[in-house]
Image: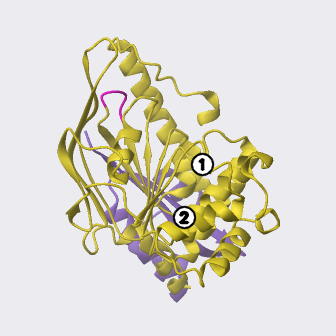
Amino acid sequence: MSDDITTDASPPGTADEQFAALELSEEERLVLAKVADIVRRINYGTVVLVIQDGKVVQIEMAEKFRLR
Amino acid sequence: MSDVITSRLRPAEAPGEGPPKLAVRDLVKTRRSTSGAVVTAVDHVTFDVRLGEFLCLLGPSGCGKTSILNVLAGLDEPTSGEALLDGRPIAGPGPDRAVLFQEPALFPWLSVAGNVDLALKLTGTPASERPDRIRTWLANVGLEAFADVQPHELSAGMRQRAQLARALATEPEVLLGDEPFGALDAQARELLQDEVQRVWLERGGRKTFVFVTHNVREAALLADRVLVMSAAPGRLLEEVRISAPRPRQLDDVLVARVVSDVHELLMREVERARADGSDRPILPQESDR
C-alpha cells in the first residue's frame, strides 16, 4: 500500500517533506488526524473514506476482534 | 465537516459506556436429543449488549444462537451461567422485551389492528390511547390500509410487518428477533430490513435490538456489532464492530467488505466442523451470503 502512495501520488522524501509538499488545508489535516486516530485504535479491520465532490464526507470503519 | 465525521462514528467509538442493557454470562445450554444423548447447544458464551445497540448473533444452523435468544426472551432457562436484563437475572418473558419470530405468531381470528390492540391491552396500554397507537404503527410499517384484514389475507411479508408493528407498538425496551426475515422472499426481506433500520434510527439509540440470523448480509446491514458463532457447540468466534451510518445499502463498500470477510470466516468454520466429523447440517446456503 505504501509503495503505491510513494510511487504514484507523492514525491519521495521524509514524511515531513511529503507533508510540506502537499500543503494540506485545515480540513484535510482534520481528516488525516481522524484517520490516524482510527488506525491507531484498530488492530484488525477496515476503514473506508467516502468522498463526494473531492471532499471526505464520511469515515466508516469495521473493527474485528478474535474471541477464540 | 469534522463534526459530521465525529457524529457518524459515535456508535462504535463508545462501546463500553454505561451499564449493559443485556448481559449473558458464561451461558451454557444443553438439551437431550431424541436418542437420549446430551447435546451442548451453547458452550460458555459471554457478551454484553449496550442500551440502544443493534446486535446481530450470526452463525451456522444449529450453533445455538436461537437458544441464546430464547434465554434472553425468558422463554428458556440457562443450563448454567446467567442472562441479565438491567443487571437483574431474566426470570421469564416480560413486556420490556418483544420477540419477532420467523413465522409471525399472529392470532388468525383477529384482524391486523386487533392483533396490535391485544398486545397493547396485555401490556397495559389504556384503552383511550390504543386506537392512536395502532394507527401510528400500522402506518409506520405501511399497513394502514390493511387494519381490518385477517392475517391469512396478507402476504408473508405483510404478516411479518404486522408482527413488527405489534411488537413495536408496545414500546418494548428490547426487541429480540429470531431469524425474523428468514422465511421471506428477497424483496420482502429488503423492504423489512429498511423498515427495521428506519425504526431503530427513529428511536435514536434508546431501543436495544438483538437479532439472530444466519444471513451474513443481513447482519452487516443492520448491526452495530456482529457476534459470529462457531458451529455446534456454539461459542463466540469473532466480533465485528461496524461504524457506518444508516440506512446502509448492501453495496456500500464497508458493508460489502464485512460481508465477504465474515462469509469467509464462516466457510472456514463450516469446513473445520465438517473435518471434525460433526454430523450437523451446518452448510450455509448460497442465499445466506
Q: From the viewer's side, name the closer residue of A66 and A37.
A: A66
**Residue beneath the point at 63% across and 60% down:** B115
Which of the chains bears the disc numbered 1?
B
Q: Is residue B164 above or below residue B187?
A: below
Q: Colour of chain A?
A: purple
Local SS, label 1: helix
**Would residue B197 be seen by someone viewing this image from the given angle?**
no
Q: Is residue B284 above or below residue A67?
A: above
Q: Is residue B231 magenta?
A: yes
Q: Residue at x 61, y 47 (%)?
A: B104
| In contact (CB < 8 Å): disc 2 and disc 1 | no
Highlighted range, magenta: B229-233
The three-letter amino acid code for the residue at tag 2 is Ala
Task: Give the vertical position of B241 relative to B3 (above or below).
Answer: above
As drawn, the label of residue B256 is 1
Judge by depth and name the residue closer to the eye, B140 or A21. Answer: B140
Tell me which chain appears yellow: B
Q: In the rendered image, which residue does mark 2 sit on?
A: B119
Asked whether A62 or B21 is in front, the reply is: B21
Image check: B276 left or right of B130?
left
Residue at x-position 53% and y-position 43%: B179
Residues packed near mark 2 inside 10 Å, few (<14), some (14 to 19) or many (20 plus): some
Q: Around disc 1, counting alpha carbons within 10 Å, would you say few (fewer than 14), some (14 to 19), or many (20 or more)?
A: some
Is B154 magenta? The answer is no
Q: Secondary structure at mark 2?
A: helix
Q: Chain of mark 2?
A: B
